Amino acid sequence: MALGCGGNEELNITLLRYKLFFARPKHLMIYGELKDTYREILDEFGVQYTVFEDYSKRSRKGEFK
């Protein structure tokens, strides 16, 4: 499942709800930042998720020295 990186936030929220309703995932693996709004929707639908930070953010924290 993919959401747009920018643009229309309201459309992305609608698409997330639509995809969760029809796909009914038990667990999602999310790469990159998870906005609080999306986190709340996943919690509302009872979907478990794991968030993996992107490489550039992790490297700035010094995790790859």
Image: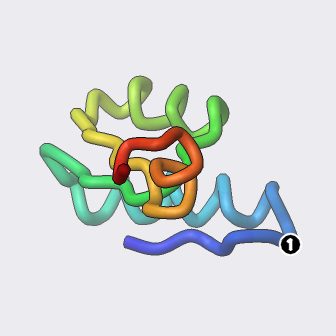
Q: Residue 11 is drawn in which quadrant?
A: bottom right
Quarter of the figure that contains the N terminus = bottom left
Please give left or right for residue 3 compared with residue 58 in the image.
right
Please give left or right for residue 41 compared with residue 5 in the image.
left
Image location of residue 2, percent across then percent down = 47, 74
Classify 42 as above or below 2. above
**Mark 1 Cα shell of 10 Å, populated few (<14), some (14-19), many (≥20):** few
Classify 41 as above or below 52. above
Image location of residue 23, percent across then percent down = 25, 64
**Residue identified by numbered label 1:** 7
Q: How is the image coloured?
A: rainbow
**Extreme residue toward the front, this view:** 65
The number of discs equals 1
Question: Which residue is painted at 25% across and 54% down in the image?
Answer: 29
**Extreme residue toward the right, this view:** 7
Q: Nearer the viewer, residue 16 or 21?
A: 16
Image location of residue 45, percent across then percent down = 36, 33
Classify 16 as above or below 38. below
Please give left or right for residue 6 compared with residue 16 in the image.
right
Looking at the rendered structure, the kind of residue marked 1 is Gly
Question: Which residue is painted at 41% across and 64% down in the image?
Answer: 19
Image location of residue 54, percent across then percent down = 46, 59
Question: Which residue is painted at 80% across and 56% down in the image?
Answer: 10
Please give left or right for residue 41 compared with residue 46 in the image.
right
Q: Secondary structure at mark 1?
A: loop
Question: Which residue is painted at 19% across and 53% down in the image?
Answer: 25
Q: Nearer the viewer, residue 13 or 59?
A: 59
